[in-house]
Amino acid sequence: MSKPLFACMLPPMPMTALGDTSIGSLTELSTESLRARSYDGAVTGVTEIDCPGRAAGARSRMLSYCSDGLGLYARLELPATPSLEGGYPVALFLHGWVGADAAPDYPYSCNQGGYCAPVICAWSDAGYAVLMPGYRGQGTVAGKPADGHDWMKTWDNGTCLSPVFYAVDALNLLAAAPGIGAPGIDAGAGAVKLDLSKVHALGHSQGGDVAAIVLAATGKGAANGLSIASGALGSGIYVDRFIQLQTDPPIETALEAVLAGDGTWTGTTIGADGTVNPNFVFGSPPNRIGTLDQTKWDWQKGQWSAPLVRVAIEMKLDEMYSTLNAQVADAGQWSWAITDREDGGFTAVHDTGLVPLMQAIGAFDAPQDVTAPLNLHFSDRDSCSTPAVNTDFCARGNGAGGKCLAFEYFANTHELSVAGEGRFSPKGTVAGFAVMTARDPALIVGQDPETIK
């Protein structure tokens, strides 16, 4: 079995490198640019890995591949069953947020816990080869860390732009996929044959943002020659970058974001005494917060430490703008401001020169480019990927000629499971995960996913 070796001599095009992690212009990250550019990834090695979390009889491999000059890793999971004559259909699985600190030791879900391992097992059991890119900076194999950890430290922050770079890595892996079975690339147990006309893109959480970008970048009319047959996102449709910045950080750091005007939790902005919280963000706190009784808090004190929503957002605005001004060559020294409203709330005012550039990035404002059939799975209580955002995206995509189905799961967590405490998931709540993993393969074979309950 060959060892993963990096021999990535590809130029970092079309992104214009100023330093290790800088780019020439935000236009290089626009959906239009991703649809127009080429992807030249190349597989440079394959090695077998010990993966206790894999499906029974499945074969786990670790690929090394090139993405815009960076040497990266991807997990390849081969089913226990032999492939069809045309090769294994492919599930391109795009995982969620890891974070720069944990990235070098990222285990590629070679365990039984969490969301990702069961997804990989379900698709492997269904006869799919699963390709799971680790993205830049993630994972270490045979003592060699993946390149690009500096990219994570620069961009995986308040800019909300790291998913675009991860989408480029996924697209380069897709472009490299024909090389997995090429001469000189030993994938073990004989040659591997993939049916790249049957690629199903899966994404969870931040990986859903990545998958949506991949789907938009390969939709009808894209010039890169890559194609996705269908897609499915679990808790993964995200709003545009500005709204992300103004919703996710407060939910994760400021309790005020989920409380009513009287300082209690009612699920709405209005308190029992009729007072309104003008800085209310979403009615359901993350289930991982446990109790909302701050007298019983332990570790929660560290995470939900911002006293006000405004403080949380100002910190992230500073992070977004300082990063962009330092890392984008044609940045116009963009600036932001906060204006107070008569209702006691506030509004973040973004630089008029930056607004159109940021709105051109990502799939949320480009549903017309997502032309593959698409399933969206989400909880009614998920602040990261809300029902309104999912149904809105589907409606706009379908209005542009797409085929999108939206599936809402009552009282489920972000992982489409049942929370351990009754405030979030009342008694009798049914986990949506198993239904999701049944609905998605049905989409590929032409069965109506809406018939599966």
Image: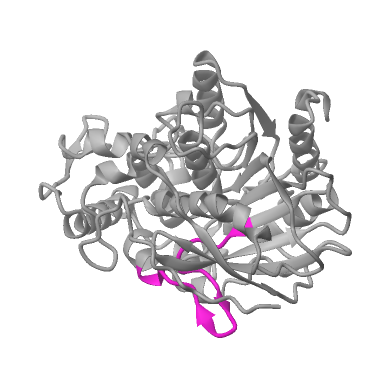
Image coordinates for residue 147, horizontal then vertical, percent: 43, 72
User: Seen in the image, is 373 located left or right of residue 420?
Assistant: left
- In the depicted view, which residue is nearer to us: 98 or 232? 232
The answer to if 430 sits in the magenta stretch is no
The answer to if 149 sits in the magenta stretch is yes
Image coordinates for residue 12, horizontal then vertical, percent: 33, 59
Vertical position of residue 452 compared to residue 245: above or below = above
- In the depicted view, which residue is nearer to us: 66 or 347? 66
- In the depicted view, which residue is nearer to us: 22 or 286? 22
Question: In which quadrant of the rendered view does residue 411 lie?
Answer: top right
Vertical position of residue 113 compared to residue 386: above or below = below
Q: Quadrant of the N terminus?
A: bottom right
Q: How many marks?
A: 0
Q: Confirm whether residue 402 shows in the render.
A: yes
User: Seen in the image, is 283 located left or right of residue 229?
Assistant: left
Image coordinates for residue 38, horizontal then vertical, percent: 41, 45
Q: At 77% from the left edge and 59% from the top edge, which residue is drawn?
A: 78
Query: What's the coloring here?
Result: one colour
The residue segment tinted magenta is: 132-150
Q: At 77% from the left edge and 34% from the top edge, which residue is drawn?
A: 439
